[in-house]
Amino acid sequence: MEGTITISQIMLRDHQKIGTLLANLNNGMNKDHQKVLELFHEFIWTLEKHFFIEERIVLTDYNPPDEKNSAAISNLLREHDHMLKLSRKLEEDLIKNKKVDISQLQKMLIKHRDYENEVLYPMLDLELNKTQKKTIVQKVTDYYKW
């Protein structure tokens, strides 16, 4: 796909944005409670969008060729669910003005991100045909345009 954006490239942009928001949240944890809530809402919204894009756009056309890849995708989806539940619990605690520790979520996100960056996205760029990749990139681009 020379001259065009790959799945890896377009999804890495999302990872960078999530990482920046998480760093901002981490740096702001001891600041004004309202500001922390705003940062957290922006973070969780971006994370939810990212997971939606992966689950409903990127992985829709991928049929794992074997049980190992199928299990890896299932595990990835379980991780999404677990991280969203943890994020929502942290959000509830923040709303109740409780002190929260985001280190567990941060560790999970880093591990998850690294797997996607190093294994999943390159694999999709290799295994999907040119039309599938072009469709995915176009759908993701369109999603962010609205």
Image (tube, grey):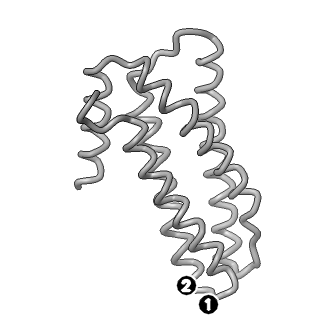
Q: Nearer the viewer, residue 7 or 81?
A: 7
- Residue positioned 30% across, 36% down in the render: 137
Kindly indicate the quadrant of the structure image that contains residue 87. bottom right
Q: Position of residue 30 (x, y in %)?
A: 69, 85
Q: Position of residue 132 (x, y in %)?
A: 30, 22
Q: Quadrant of the N terminus?
A: top left
- Indicate the amino acid at tag 2: Lys
Please tell me how many numbered marks the rendered image carries. Answer: 2
Q: Which residue is mark 1?
A: 32
Q: Is residue 83 left or right of residue 1?
A: right
- Residue positioned 63% across, 86% down in the render: 33
Residue 115: mark in rendering: none
When the figure is inspected, residue 18 is found, relative to residue 122, above or below; the finding is below
- Indicate the amino acid at tag 1: Asp
When the figure is inspected, residue 123 is found, relative to residue 104, above or below; the finding is above
Q: Secondary structure at mark 2?
A: helix
Residue farthest front in this picture:
2
- Residue positioned 41% across, 33% down in the render: 58
Residue farthest top in this picture:
66
Q: Nearer the viewer, residue 145 or 117?
A: 117
Q: Position of residue 145 (x, y in %)?
A: 23, 54
Q: Quadrant of the C terminus?
A: bottom left
Q: Which residue is mark 2?
A: 35
Question: Distance between the Cα atoms at labels 1 and 2?
Answer: 5 Å
Q: Are marks 1 and 2 in contact (CB under 8 Å)?
A: yes
Q: Nearer the viewer, residue 99 or 122?
A: 122
Residue farthest bottom in this picture:
32
Label 2 crowd bin: few (<14), some (14–19), many (20+), radius 10 Å? some
- Residue positioned 65% across, 73% down in the render: 26
When the figure is inspected, residue 62 is found, relative to residue 17, above or below; the finding is above
Q: Position of residue 89 (x, y in %)?
A: 69, 61
Kindly indicate the quadrant of the structure image that contains residue 62. top left
